[in-house]
Image (spheres, helix red, strand yellow):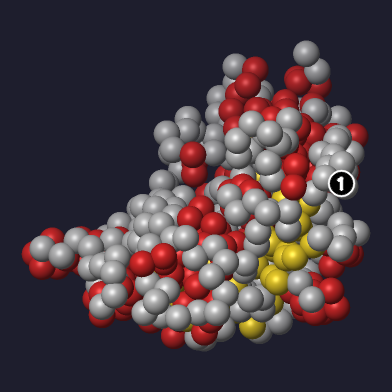
């Protein structure tokens, strides 16, 4: 048996040689443009240009306003409002929509926790809708099944980078007179049927956390085409209670503001990063097409699917795994494939991960219904309703988490098709040797 034959037959998890020894390249997110942008801000001495009181700097300094204009102009939004994290961005969006105690907001349970906790911060109640088993997004049908007379809004999460089917969701929202918020944290720079996401609903936005396609370390960018919504976001971001006399608005709901402001240094980095976003998305889409074509030929693995008219940014690449076809449990399969790849130094070098987020409603916060204070607020507001977050309310989500979904962060820059080919070879090697894994 030659070395190549040995590599392809004896699994690394059982003591054989790894299929690939060369480390997978890590992302390098900061370059010369970012360095120069930071130096320019440092030399200016103005690390934050915001004032929390009336005046021209209430909207921030030069770099913050430049970054916001550049983002809005690039994708055709009327307004872009930067914030210091996407968590505070979500809180700002919920506040700007006027969500208050006892208002129900429909959201996916298969997402980062802040998509739902941002609703709780204003006393709203998250109502979890199930997902489509192919796109992993909530749909008009799953949303409608959760609508009650107390429903005030929908939070649509474009998960993994896959755009939700926004046209049908907007038809539903208009039918029931509901506000629509779009969480595009993982999906910057993509469109649904030719229109940029987060431009369908009343408000939306993107994460600038350091794991994302482009980033400012931490940060977020809200977008809207509504002047009043933009003003409300700007007020919440920057101590709104100090400004409502200067910027009069009729509805003072949730205008108790905070400090969610982005710094000049972060904004300067964002200006430089934004020029790269389209290239990053295109690179990931090319790798995804290459990866998906090969996965489609492997029994037991279903590659990511796109809804009609949707685009995908591939923050993560989801795969559905069928252990009944492969004869290998999902956990053992994931461990065996990862063993064929070089040791991981950073998360983005991981081959496969199983399950994604545990359905949010299983968290103690929802099971015990204790969020703010000790008396069950905000669920206690609606005394005529018995809210339940029992197992089984979102069966597709639970099935994906427990049995079917695996995902990879390897569909990214600077990896090339040859790196993806090694990944696919590792998958094929494991699937070709199921008997080695029986114990």
Element under label 1? loop
Q: Is residue 43 left or right of residue 278?
A: left
Q: Residue at x 65, y 17 (%)?
A: 14
Residue 15 in which image quadrant: top right
Residue 140 image offset from top left, x and y in percent: 84, 67
Q: Residue at x 47, y 60 (%)?
A: 256
- Identify the image quadrant of the N terminus: top right
Q: Residue at x 52, y 84 (%)?
A: 227
Residue 166 image offset from top left, x and y in percent: 74, 74
Say if residue 288 shows up in the picture. Answer: no
- Identify the image quadrant of the C terminus: top right
Q: Is residue 66 above or below residue 7?
A: below
Residue 279 image offset from top left, x and y in percent: 46, 71
Residue 274 in which image quadrant: bottom left
Question: How many C-alpha atoms fall within 10 Å of the one at disc 1: few (<14), some, or many (≥20)?
Answer: few
Q: Is residue 155 above or below residue 361?
A: below
Q: Residue at x 37, y 72 (%)?
A: 243
Residue 255 image offset from top left, x and y in percent: 49, 65
Say if residue 167 shows up in the picture. Answer: yes
Q: Is residue 433 left or right of residue 322?
A: left
Q: Is residue 336 above or below residue 181?
A: above
Residue placed furthest toward the top: 439
Q: Across the whole image, how many numbered discs are drawn on residues?
A: 1
Along the viewing direction, whichever of 288 and 357 lies nearer the viewer: 357
| Residue designated by label 1 | 385
Q: Is residue 282 left or right of residue 99?
A: left
């Amino acid at each position: 048996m030659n070395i190549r034959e040995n590599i392809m037959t004896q699994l690394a998890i059982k003591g054989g040689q790894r299929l690939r020894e060369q480390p997978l390249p890590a992302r390098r997110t900061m370059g010369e443009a970012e360095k120069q942008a930071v130096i320019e801000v440092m030399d200016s001495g103005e690390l934050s240009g915001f004032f929390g009181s009336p005046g021209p700097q209430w909207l921030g300094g030069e770099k913050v306003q430049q970054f916001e204009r550049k983002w809005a102009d690039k994708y055709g939004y009327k307004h872009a409002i930067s914030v210091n994290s996407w968590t505070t961005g979500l809180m700002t969006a919920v506040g700007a929509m006027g969500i208050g105690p006892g208002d129900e907001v429909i959201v996916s349970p298969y997402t980062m926790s802040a998509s739902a906790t941002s609703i709780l911060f204003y006393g709203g109640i998250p109502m979890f809708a199930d997902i489509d088993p192919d796109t992993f997004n909530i749909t008009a049908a799953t949303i409608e099944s959760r609508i009650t007379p107390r429903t005030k809004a929908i939070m649509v999460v474009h998960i993994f980078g896959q755009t939700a089917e926004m046209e049908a969701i907007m038809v539903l929202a208009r039918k029931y007179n509901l506000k629509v918020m779009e969480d595009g944290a993982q999906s910057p720079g993509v469109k649904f049927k030719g229109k940029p996401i987060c431009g369908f609903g009343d408000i939306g936005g993107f994460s600038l956390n350091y794991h994302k396609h482009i980033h400012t370390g931490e940060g977020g960018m809200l977008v809207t085409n509504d002047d009043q919504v933009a003003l409300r976001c700007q007020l919440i971001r920057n101590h709104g209670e100090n400004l409502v006399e200067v910027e009069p608005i009729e509805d003072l709901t949730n205008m108790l503001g905070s400090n969610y402001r982005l710094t000049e240094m972060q904004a300067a980095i964002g200006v430089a990063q934004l020029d790269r976003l389209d290239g990053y998305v295109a690179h990931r889409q090319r790798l995804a097409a290459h990866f998906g074509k090969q996965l489609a030929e492997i029994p037991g693995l279903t590659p990511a699917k796109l809804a009609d008219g949707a685009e995908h940014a591939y923050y993560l690449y989801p795969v559905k795994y069928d252990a009944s076809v492969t004869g290998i449990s999902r956990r053992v399969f994931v461990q065996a494939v990862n063993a064929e790849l070089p040791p991981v130094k950073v998360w983005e070098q991981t081959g496969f991960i199983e399950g994604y987020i545990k359905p949010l409603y299983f968290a103690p916060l929802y099971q015990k219904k204790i969020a703010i204070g000790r008396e069950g607020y905000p669920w206690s507001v609606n005394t005529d309703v018995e809210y339940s977050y029992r197992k089984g309310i979102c069966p597709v989500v639970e099935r994906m988490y427990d049995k079917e979904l695996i995902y990879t962060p390897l569909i990214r820059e600077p990896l090339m098709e040859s790196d993806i080919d090694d990944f696919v070879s590792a998958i094929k090697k494991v699937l070709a040797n199921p008997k080695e894994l029986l114990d």
